[in-house]
Image (spheres, rainbow, N blue to C red):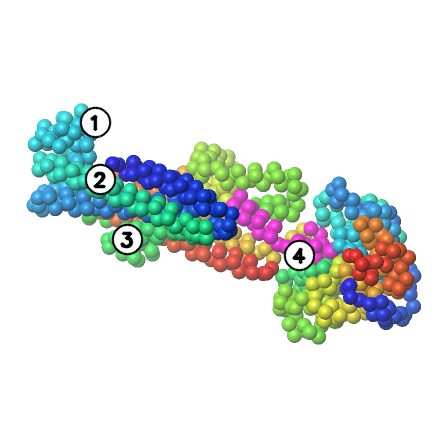
Amino acid sequence: MNIMTETALESAVSDKMNGTPNETIKMRGQKVCVFYGEKQALFDVNLDVRENQVTALIGPSGCGKSTFLRCLNRMNDTIDAARVAGEITLDGEDIYDPRIDVVELRARVGMVFQKPNPFPKSIYENVAYGPRIHGLARNKPELDAIVESSLQRAGLFNEVKDRLHEPGTGLSGGQQQRLCIARAIAVSPEVILMDEPCSALDPIATARVEELIDELRQNYTIVIVTHSMQQAARVSQRTAMFHLGYLVEEGETDKMFTNPDDKRTQDYITGRFG
Amino acid sequence: MSLMTVFVAVLAIGAVAFFLGRQRALAQDDGGIKPHSRAHYHGWWAFLLATMPALLLLVVWGVGSNVYLESHVRSQLPQQSAESALANPALAASLTKSLANGLRRLDAQTATNPPATFSELQPLLATRGVALAPDTQDYMIPVAVDANRTQDWLSVIGAVLILIVSAGGAVLGLSQIQVRARARNNVEKLMLWGLLAASTIAILTTIGIILSMLFQTIHFFESVSFTNFFFGTVWDPRFAAAGSDSSEGQFGLIPLLAGTLYIALVAMLVAVPIGLMSAVYMSEYASPKVRAVVKPALELLAGIPTIVYGIFALVALGPFLRDLSAALAGGTSFIQAQSVLTAGLVMGVMLIPVVSSLSDDIITAVPRAMRDGSLGLGATRSETIKRVILPAALPGIVGAILLTASRAIGETMIVVLAAGVAAKLTLNPFEAMTTITVKIVNQLTGDLEFNSPQTLVAFALGITLFALTLVMNIFALYIVRKYREQYE
């Protein structure tokens, strides 16, 4: 990423300057602090996620961007020592409210992980997993339809339609990651969180997933953590820059990459640190 | 010189070689060329050269001189007529050797010139606390004296040879010390051989056990047919009258095998669900604090000797079940104190920690990514466990269950006390049945001759049991290994 030139950045940014921005706020984080035991990992982060946009979280390793992402569907709950303070809302509802069912929340806010993690089951079963546990299909044809449309939306259907009942672990890395995206789509979430979804993939598979993210934005709100500046520039409408647990700056992606307010953002995206 | 003295002397030479070697290596390091090995490696190499060949020779000489002595004694003993009790040369030789050992207790004067007859010698030896078999003959006395003399000579020659080898090794080791000598690599190589030897011992012992059982089993099948043993449904070995080969018995394996498998089945029905559930609790739900208490407590169960479980079954659970059934049925109890149920329940409790700790490891080995993936889709914990983790861990768990089953089949003390000795074929778990292990214990208890089918059958049973558990273990390992490849 360090060899990226300003012109390359600008052309990447201008490539996706089409479509009218939707300014409805889907999720809002206010004064979010996260503690791992004694150590504080996030400090008073205020960040809005806009509906049907891709929000990219960037910043050097250990800056808290993944931690913030995991707060959005309460995956931090699965870590014993983690504690979250502040308020995060989804459509105006506080997701840390005791009345909120975390299982329901995670069905609305899905997640795709850094490393492709298909279950050791068939491709079909991987995608059918979510609909099954949430009872989204009343019968087999309905389930089949969900599986097919999810795989289609993830751009995987044509590659796997003849081997739906072979193990998902037998696919290539890029295919596995798209399978995981299909799996997340299958429960019809409103928001999809992606934690460095391309970091384990080769450039061609990465391009494929990036295209997919751009298509998915029509129907879903997407938050993506990435280490790749080009990727943030290519796929996102808004970008948030984290550093040492603080939100440094947040704004429209093209502005962030061409004319950032903060010196640290400038330094990071031009490769001076990180 | 006794072997012990020689042994200590060799070690002493080795120690001297070590210190000399280290010093020499230190002295050679003048700061010019970088030494290949640090000084103490040179010391160790000298030590190893001084001790290892010498100790090997010690062992070989010790065994060899005994073999030689045995044949030497046998060649000097007169041939006996076939009717004599001493017709067996091994028996005569062993009597002579114990006589020779007895003579060593006497003072040197009497030992080299003992009384000529056994009747005179016996009271003399008795005062020294040496009891000899009354079969000992007068003509054995000079042979014994000669044997002692030969032995003395052999040990002196041996000691000298061993010490020469040891000193030679030390000199060789010391002469090899040079700045660039690769003492470190040499020591490493010897370490490798030492470790190899250690692991070979276990394998060789196993082979030895199998072979000895196999020979006795072949012996057994000389008097009892294969079909009688493997397909016979009646177990009635009778008692072997000493010296008579005519006592006919029936050695049907089927009732014992049925009892073994039945009790193991009951035990598994107890152990597998409970063990598995506790493993799931421990690996998925328990907080670190709870886990720190419960896991060791559960593993404590595995540390209780099985005889204790057996006693518990015999004196507590068995009578309790009997009385309970009597109360339920109103008078007559339908559960016997010793029964399949009692033995199976107690054995099941014994096996809980085995199942749980093996499965715990396997469940914990399922990558966190699997859990996250499922939880991230909005699955609950138990859905995640049921639909993702257990299926992913299933091959490993099956392997663990098979390993546990082979322990259940081989378990002895619980069934000896709790299962009963009646070799019956029944499906009623409230009645007593018996197992292969119980019958092995029964057939080998008491004063026995190892040439009647009544005792030899124990070896046939043992090897059957061995084959059974071996096959299960191999199958379990095969499954576990297959499972391991999944996440690579």
- B335 versus B479 height, above or below: above
Are callouts 4 and 2 both on one chain?
A: yes
Q: Secondary structure at mark 3?
A: helix
Are callouts 2 and 1 both on one chain?
A: yes
Residue B243 lies, in percent from the top left, at 18, 44
Residue B421 lies, in percent from the top left, at 36, 42
- Residue A161 shows in this picture: yes
Give the number of the disc on residue B156. Answer: 2
State the residue position of label 1: B129
State the residue position of label 3: B215
Q: Marks 4/3: CA distance?
A: 52 Å
Badge 2: residue crowd in 10 Å (few <14, some 14–19, many ≥20):
some
Q: Amino acid at mark 2?
A: Val
Residue A237 lies, in percent from the top left, at 86, 64
User: Residue sitting at 88 percent across and 61 percent down?
Assistant: A256
Q: Marks 4/2: CA distance?
A: 72 Å
Q: Marks 2/3: CA distance?
A: 39 Å
Count of numbered tags = 4
Badge 3: residue crowd in 10 Å (few <14, some 14–19, many ≥20):
few
Are callouts 2 and 3 both on one chain?
A: yes
Say which chain tag 2 marks.
B
User: Residue sitting at 54 percent across and 48 percent down?
Assistant: B358
- A162 versus B376 height, above or below: below
Q: Earlier in the sequence, mark 4 or mark 1?
A: 1
